[in-house]
């Protein structure tokens, strides 16, 4: 129990640094600007037809091509680019708590940061249409109408008809939220494991950027069958097959696969922490 408290305390120390580092403000501004540009025009549609919209915008927004998912992954790259979070205090923290407890605290920090990131991201998709939002467990008249008309082209994202007929709004939103959370944890652990192995921050950032752009590159070259092997593509709900019978990744497959990848990266981190020197990195 004492080790759990130590790990939690170490994770909170990482969260407290957000208030003094402008990098986190940059991430927030990036997400605010991109979601505002895409979602805010929906207010004009609501005022024109005199009907408010339901809050289930996230699955449609994140599934519009690969630009929203690329920006999201770049934001996550900025969030975790300083992994493995080794500072001047780290040697002292390792002596007091032990390396495994210190590592547990940093992994917990990645998880907590991912939860906060996911909540903020969802909140921003609702914030920009807040005066015109009403609670409902249905897709609502606005989204159902936009999915079948040319007005859809006037927004900064697409309302997908196939998603509306395939998923209930709450289910689609929960699926998107869980995938964003898993993608955030995966990005943090990926950068952590690679930088820990090379004892440098640069390799993890490079691999993280390759991961972030991989889905867009495959789509550009017309290789959608490769999406099964590219976790970044799994953010787009339209590229996941609920039946698991198509050439694109199955719904269950994608969630199980990324969860297993997170567990594998966690195991690699625990294996590596015994072998690497703890040397402070410059502040990012």
Image (cartoon, rainbow, N blue to C red):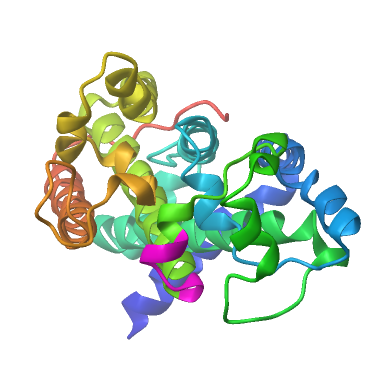
- From the image, give the main secondary structure of the stretch colored magenta: helix
Quadrant of the snapshot with the N terminus: bottom left
Point out the stretch of residues depicted in magenta: 164-170
Extreme-top residue of the structure: 221
Q: Residue furthest bottom?
A: 1
Q: Residue furthest front?
A: 149
The answer to whether residue 139 shows anywhere in this view is yes
- Please provide percent x and percent y for residue 187: 36, 42
User: Of 125 and 82, which appears nearest the observer?
Assistant: 125
Q: Residue at x 15, y 42 (%)?
A: 272
Q: Nearer the viewer, residue 68 or 60?
A: 60
Between 239 and 87, which is closer to the camera in this rendering? 239
Q: Position of residue 177 (x, y in %)?
A: 46, 62
Q: Position of residue 72 (x, y in %)?
A: 52, 39
For the C terminus, the quadrant is top right
> Where in the figure is residue 76, as x and y percent of width and height?
49, 40
């Amino acid at each position: 129990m004492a080790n759990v408290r130590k790990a939690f305390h170490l994770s909170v120390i990482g969260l407290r640094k957000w208030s003094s580092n402008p990098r986190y403000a940059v991430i927030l501004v990036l997400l605010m600007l991109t979601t505002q540009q895409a979602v805010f025009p929906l207010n004009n549609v609501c005022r024109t037809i005199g009907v408010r919209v339901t809050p289930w915008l996230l699955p449609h927004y994140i599934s519009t091509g690969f630009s929203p998912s690329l920006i999201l992954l770049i934001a996550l790259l900025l969030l975790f680019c300083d992994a493995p979070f080794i500072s001047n205090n780290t040697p002292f923290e390792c002596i007091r708590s032990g390396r495994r407890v210190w590592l547990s605290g940093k992994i917990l920090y990645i998880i907590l940061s991912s939860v906060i990131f996911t909540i903020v991201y969802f909140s921003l998709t609702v914030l920009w249409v807040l005066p015109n939002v009403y609670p409902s467990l249905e897709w609502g008249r606005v989204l159902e109408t936009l999915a079948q008309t040319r007005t859809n082209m006037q927004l900064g994202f697409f309302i997908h008809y196939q998603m509306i007929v395939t998923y209930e709004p709450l289910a689609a939103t929960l699926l998107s939220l869980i995938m964003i959370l898993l993608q955030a944890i995966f990005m943090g652990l990926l950068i952590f494991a690679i930088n820990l192995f090379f004892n440098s921050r640069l390799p993890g950032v490079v691999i993280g950027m390759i991961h972030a752009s991989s889905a867009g590159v495959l789509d550009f070259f017309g290789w959608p069958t490769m999406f099964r092997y590219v976790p970044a593509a799994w953010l787009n709900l339209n590229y996941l097959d609920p039946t698991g019978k198509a050439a694109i990744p199955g719904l269950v497959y994608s969630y199980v696969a990324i969860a297993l990848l997170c567990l594998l990266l966690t195991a690699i981190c625990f294996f590596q922490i015994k072998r690497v020197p703890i040397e402070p990195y410059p502040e990012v």
